Amino acid sequence: MNSKHKTVFIAFSSQKGGVGKSTFTTLLASTLHYRLGYNVAVFDADFPQHSLMKMKSRDLAMVMENEHLKKLAYKQFTTINKKAYPIMQHKADSVLEAAQEFLNTSPVAVDVVFFDLPGTVNTPGILKALAGMHHIFTPITADRVVMESTLIFTQLLQDVIMKKGETSIETINLFWNQVDGRESTPLYEIYNQLMEQLGLSLMQSQIKNSNRFRKESEENSKTVFRSTVMSPDERLMKACQLDQFINEFLKIIQL
């Protein structure tokens, strides 16, 4: 393999369940791999749920049972002329070694590896795994409990990991998720100021609250949004401003 080729390790990480780590991992992996021409691999270390492994079999079944999606998938795969990205299951404490081993034996040069890690700092090996990432992205919502646990977690990462210098982390990026376009709550202002005072990086892009995140497994759907085997529909991406998020994401990780 080309030794100059740098593979970027990325985790969507959060201390709070249900903020969309697995969803964002899938959306970004699928956009980069199926639409933007990068080679992607995913490690699902979110034990015991392993929701990405389960998602992949559901996604394949959904495509096979829906004529419209089957045609879309066929068109996609004949156009890009490459396979679906691999999703591998692994425990957090040795996931970095597993990823390295995978890269050493991969027949194609992999551009990005996404890691879906457990949402709690007391999982064995989780801090070591996080310290092995180049970029960490943390979705936040304007909710006091989410913000408190996120700020504590992000401070911990910054203090413990960044100071020791034995880390690969280049950036830690928070971003607003599930933003209701109609409400301009004073909470956002307060939190934005707080994050600035703490020296945390907040992305400019905000993901708008869209019911697409929830209701997409309808049987006869003509479009897909969150899928491990197809890239998200462009109109649905625009609706929640995921397209802007992806542009900013690519600038940060400098592929």
Image (tube, rainbow, N blue to C red):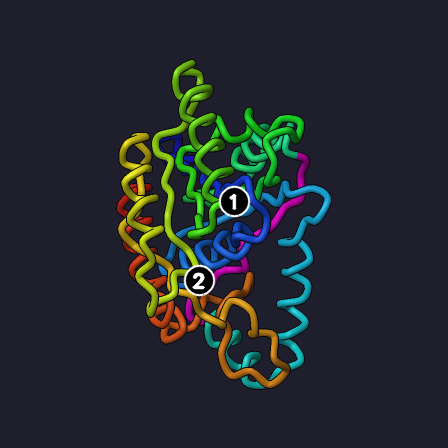
At label 2, the amino acid type is Tyr
Q: Is residue 154 above or below residue 244?
A: above
Q: Is residue 83 magenta?
A: yes
Quarter the N terminus occupies: top left
Q: Cβ–Cβ below 8 Å for labels 2 and 1?
A: no
Question: Of helix, strand and loop, which one carries label 1?
Answer: helix
**Amino acid type at image mark 1:** Val
For residue 82, say whether it is visible.
yes
Pick whichever of labels 2 and 1 is earlier in the sequence: 2
Q: Name the residue rendered at 67%, 39% in the picture.
A: 90
Picture layout, residue 123 above or below residue 146: above
- The residue pinned by badge 2 equals 34
**Residue at figure coordinates x 43%, y 38% from the top left:** 136
Q: Is residue 99 left or right of residue 147?
A: right
Picture quarter with the C terminus:
top left
As helix, strand or loop, the secondary structure at mark 2 comes to helix
| Nearer-the-camera pick, 229 or 251 | 251
Please tell me the numbered disc located at residue 145: 1
Residue sticking out furthest to the front: 186
- Label placed on residue 199: none
Closest to the observer, 126 or 29? 126
Whether residue 171 sits left or right of residue 25 in the image: it is left
Q: Measured from the top left, where is residue 164 in percent x and y?
A: 42, 14
In the image, residue 21 sits, relative to residue 237, either above or below, namely: above
Please tell me how crowded label 2 is: few (under 14), some (14-19), or many (20+) other residues with Cα within 10 Å.
many
Q: Position of residue 61 (x, y in %)?
A: 68, 72
Residue 255 can be seen, yes or no: no
Q: Quadrant of residue 69?
A: bottom right
Q: Give the magenta-colored segment's residue range.
A: 78-91
Residue 94 at what x, y percent from top left? 64, 28
Residue 127, image quadrant: top right
